[in-house]
Image: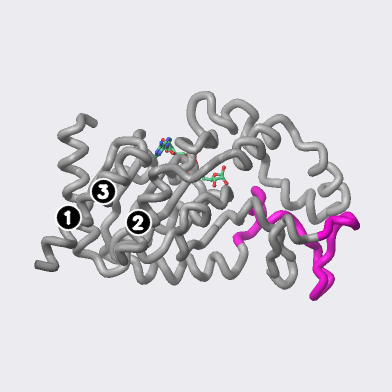
Amino acid sequence: MSQPELEQAVKEAARLIIGSRHVVALVGAGLSVESGIPPFRGPGRLWTRYGEPDMLGYDRFLEDPKKWWEERMHPSQAQLELTVALTQAKPNAGHRALRDLEEMGCLKHIITQNIDNLHQEAGSRAITEIHGNLTKLRCLDCGQRWLLAEFPLEELPPRCPHCGGFVKSDGVMFGEPIPRDALDECVTQTRLCDCMLLVGTSAVVYPAAGLPVDVKRGGGKLIEVNPQETALTDLCDVVLRAPAGESLPLLVARVRELASLSRR
Ligand code: APR
């Protein structure tokens, strides 16, 4: 997309946001690419290089949690590459732009598929992590969560001190159901939403990819922020065909301008 085309699209997106009551951002791996975290799909990407994990990961955990935890101490090349990138990453201009939109009262909630904790590090507050968070552990029975750094891993598999349930990483594995509290909040936010920003997601993994479709069905608008076309491009009202770290700060500047004009 040429610069003038991008600026025109940013103007349209800013008008949509200013005219909406409840804007929600659905975020994917693309937002963290400019923080050095590789996305999953596409040429040379993580799953393309190492193969997408099968859907039995969670079943294997349930079959033998002790074995799973012991294996976790010896990560595969793909896991190692992802963990190193995740631990070294810092929020980028795209994360900060979403924080700014929230502080301006124009963004009500972030539903993120990312497990990297970068929204929190950027200062965003209203966040639902539909695929969990790498820095946390979770009890499978009562849903309690702890910071990994604060939970003693003396005994494997670790057990919940409250209900005795098995404790695993908070990251949602392939084949694992989305935690109830996160799913409920996604449904609530989607019902309230009249404008959804789709930021850096290929929109192929469900249930996350179904949320924008529900917003559209409910009469809401969709704005795509992605350098590439996605599975939902045809449903979108406005497309910012550029990296999020470049286009989202432009969007914040336009929204701020329009908001100050409407206050006069
Ligand atoms: N800015 C915005 N978008 C970008 C950027 C960027 N700088 N760079 C790449 N993208 C886009 C790609 O074009 C692609 O559409 O980000 C998207 C990343 O897609 P995926 O790798 O499929 O990631 P995501 O949609 O988050 O995957 C969903 O799949 O593997 C699971 O649990 C994992 O949460 C993940 C889920």
Mark 2 belongs to which amino acid?
Asp
At x 35%, y 71%, the residue is: 192
Disc 2: residue Cβ within 8 A of ligand 1's nearest atom? no
- Where in the figure is residue 263, as x and y percent of width and height? 13, 68
Q: Are marks 1 and 3 in contact (CB under 8 Å)?
A: no
Q: Position of residue 61 (x, y in %)?
A: 79, 52
Q: Position of residue 30 (x, y in %)?
A: 45, 40
CB contact under 8 Å: marks 2 and 1:
no
The residue singled out by tag 1 in the image is: 257
Alpha carbons under labels 2 and 1: distance apart:
13 Å
Q: CA distance from mark 2 to mark 3?
A: 10 Å
Q: Main secondary structure of the magenta part?
A: loop
Please name the amino acid that badge 1 sits on. Glu
Q: In the structure shown, which secondary structural element does the residue marked by tag 1 occupy?
A: helix
For marks 1 and 3 on the same chain, the one whose residue lies earlier in the sequence? 3
Secondary structure beneath label 2? helix
Q: Residue at x 51, y 62 (%)?
A: 128
Q: Earlier in the sequence, mark 2 or mark 3?
A: 2
The reply, left or right, for residue 156 in relation to residue 162 is right
> Mark 1, mark 3: which one is toward the viewer?
1
148 horizontally vs 191: left or right: right
Q: Position of residue 214 (x, y in %)?
A: 37, 61
Q: CA distance from mark 1 to mark 3?
A: 10 Å
Residue bounds of the magenta highlight: 152-178
Which picture quadrant has residue 52? top right
- Dot 3 corresponds to which residue? 251
Residue placed under numbered mark 2 in the picture: 100
Quarter the C terminus occupies: bottom left
